[in-house]
Image (cartoon, rainbow, N blue to C red):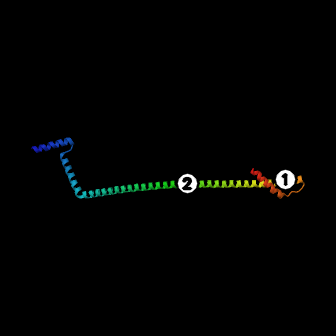
Amino acid sequence: MSFIDRLVSGVEAAVEQALGINLLDMVVQILATIVLMIIVKKFFWGRITEFLEKRRKFMETEITEAEQANQEALQLKETRDAELKEIRMKSKEYYENAKNRGEDEKNRIINHAKNEADTIVSNGHKEIDHELKKAREELQKEIVSIASLMAEKVINKKVDEKDFLDVTIKDIESSEEL
């Protein structure tokens, strides 16, 4: 046996003992794998790479569309938030305007009521003054009438009430000045 034969038989024994397989089976298996790789490369590799490239492009497109949809959703959310803020501000403004109008209406009603009360009080004072003047005039007439009756009894003569009234009014006015 030559050196190469012994080396091959030693390697066979070591491989068989370590791996539990025959060296010839291993060489056949390696050659079958290489033949399979050549066949796949020759007939299927283009289709596989084409499929993988299409799948990669599809995934990139999906990712891009998802990012765009996300951006659009964020913009839409910002727009809705801005609109909501604007609506809240408008409602607050409407509330404030309504409140101010209510306050203005309240003040107007109060002022109107005060003016009416002042008018009623003023008219009441005028009526009281008028009634007082009327009562004074009636009192003066009564005094004149009583005075003329008394004078008539004293002198047994009928005194003209009109002349007596003029004299009596002048007397009353002069006594009021004092």
Residue that label 2 marks: 100
The residue depicted at 18 percent of the width and 48 percent of the height is 27
- Where does the image place residue 102, in percent across and percent down from the top left? 57, 54
The residue depicted at 51 percent of the width and 53 percent of the height is 92
- 38 relative to 133 in the view: left or right: left
Disc sitting over residue 147 in the figure: 1
- Residue 15, by quadrant, is top left
Q: Is 25 or 47 nearer to us in this picture?
A: 47
Q: Is residue 125 visible?
A: yes
- Please, which residue is most extreme toward the right here? 156
The image shows residue 175, relative to residue 15, as above or below, that is below
Number of callouts: 2
Residue at disc 2, secondary structure: helix
The image shows residue 69, relative to residue 19, as above or below, that is below
Instruction: Say what amino acid the circle numbered 1 marks.
Output: Ala
- Where does the image place residue 156, in percent across and percent down from the top left? 90, 54
- Where does the image place residue 56, in percent across and percent down from the top left? 30, 56
The residue depicted at 25 percent of the width and 58 percent of the height is 46
Q: Residues within 10 Å of mark 2 (few under 14, many from 20)?
A: few
- Where does the image place residue 31, in percent across and percent down from the top left? 19, 51
Of labels 2 and 1, the one closer to you: 1
- 18 relative to 71 in the view: left or right: left
- 175 relative to 46 in the view: left or right: right
The residue depicted at 66 percent of the width and 54 percent of the height is 118
Instruction: Say what amino acid the circle numbered 2 marks.
Output: Asn
Q: Is 57 or 93 nearer to us in this picture?
A: 93
Q: Is 44 or 145 nearer to us in this picture?
A: 145
